[in-house]
Image: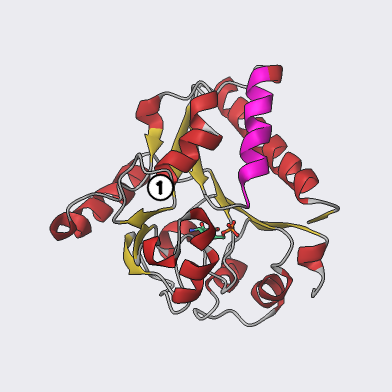
């Protein structure tokens, strides 16, 4: 779906999320949302906050699982995805803090495999993600699944590509401060979501075209989404330029 602007696209995604939350509320069921970070979902989170304040949208039945987190990082560091999510969304809505799940970037390394397995087991126990929000990296990464990530990959510790570290340097003082590792949910976890909405704005035209119209390949992780039965790319006109 192509929108005239990132703002218009973000509002449409917020509307879909609000409708899902309300439908689940009406059935007395939890709504499990998969959350993403980065510049892309900022308008979406602002719109959800606005809907909470002005339209009474409640998040009391919402359970969230974030895709990824830098490693190592303290959760209250300004650059952590824990801080990002609280700054942009969680501090401004009525979600129960016990329902928020974000990979812990300061978990001891020797135990990280067990930690990752427990993170996805908790999600599976809840019946999986109802709606997964994704952004896309310039190299086609989703979450922090860099090119070459297996379609079977699970939640794990990964090494970031230098291009990813450069793209994310703006969040840090300089590139040497950008962590070299991250915890990310795997491609297999992402594919289990009942519905997936990938958002892409502006300078992403080349990788969006490859992901949507190119061959499905693990070298472009977002292209794997072609095999999901309910996935929509919500993009603005600049991001659609090469389709
Ligand atoms: C980041 C995140 C991804 C995000 C992507 C794009 O590093 N780990 O979840 O989708 O890269 O980032 P942005 O939205 O800032 O372009």
Q: Nearer the viewer, residue 231 or 77?
A: 77
Residue drawn at the location 49% of the way across and 30% of the way down: 90
Position above or below: 182 against 88: below
Residue drawn at the location 48% of the way across and 59% of the way down: 143
* Quadrant of the image containing the N terminus: bottom right
Residue 178: quarter of image: bottom left
Q: Nearer the viewer, residue 114 or 48?
A: 48
- Return the residue at label 1: 80
Instruction: Please state the horizontal and vertical placement of residue 49, each as a whole percent of the image.
Output: 62, 28
Residue drawn at the location 30% of the way across and 50% of the way down: 105
Instruction: Please state the horizontal and vertical placement of residue 237, each as a whole percent of the image.
Output: 83, 61
Ligand 1 visible in quadrant: bottom right
From the viewer's perspective, is 140 left or right of 143?
right
- In reply to whether residue 50 is colored magenta, the answer given is yes
Residue 216: quarter of image: bottom right
Position above or below: 59 against 210: above
Q: Which residues are magenta?
A: 40-53
From the viewer's perspective, is 49 left or right of 102?
right
Name the residue at the right extreme: 4
Residue 14: quarter of image: top right
Instruction: Please state the horizontal and vertical placement of residue 214, each as a whole percent of the image.
Output: 67, 81
Instruction: Please state the horizontal and vertical placement of residue 109, each as a whole percent of the image.
Output: 18, 58
């Amino acid at each position: 779906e192509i929108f005239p602007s990132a703002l218009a696209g973000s509002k449409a995604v917020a509307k879909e999320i609000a409708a899902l939350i309300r439908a689940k509320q009406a059935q007395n069921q939890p709504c499990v949302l998969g959350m993403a970070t980065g510049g892309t979902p900022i308008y979406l989170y602002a719109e959800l906050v606005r809907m909470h304040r002005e339209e009474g949208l409640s998040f009391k039945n919402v359970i969230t699982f974030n895709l990824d987190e830098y490693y190592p990082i303290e959760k209250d560091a300004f650059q952590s995805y824990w801080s990002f999510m609280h700054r942009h969304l969680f501090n401004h809505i009525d979600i129960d803090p016990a329902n928020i799940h974000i990979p812990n970037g300061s978990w001891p390394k020797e135990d990280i495999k067990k930690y990752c397995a427990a993170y996805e087991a908790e999600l599976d126990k809840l019946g999986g993600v109802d709606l997964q929000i994704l952004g896309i990296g310039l190299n086609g990464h989703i979450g922090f699944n860099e090119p070459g990530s297996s379609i079977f990959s699970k939640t794990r510790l990964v090494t970031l590509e230098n291009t990813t570290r450069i793209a994310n340097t703006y969040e840090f003082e300089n590139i040497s401060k950008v962590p070299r590792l991250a915890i990310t949910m795997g491609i297999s976890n992402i594919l289990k979501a009942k519905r997936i909405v990938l958002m892409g704005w502006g300078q992403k035209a080349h990788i969006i075209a490859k992901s949507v119209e190119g061959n499905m390949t693990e070298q472009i992780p977002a292209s794997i989404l072609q095999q999901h039965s309910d996935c929509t790319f919500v993009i603005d006109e600049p991001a659609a330029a090469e389709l």
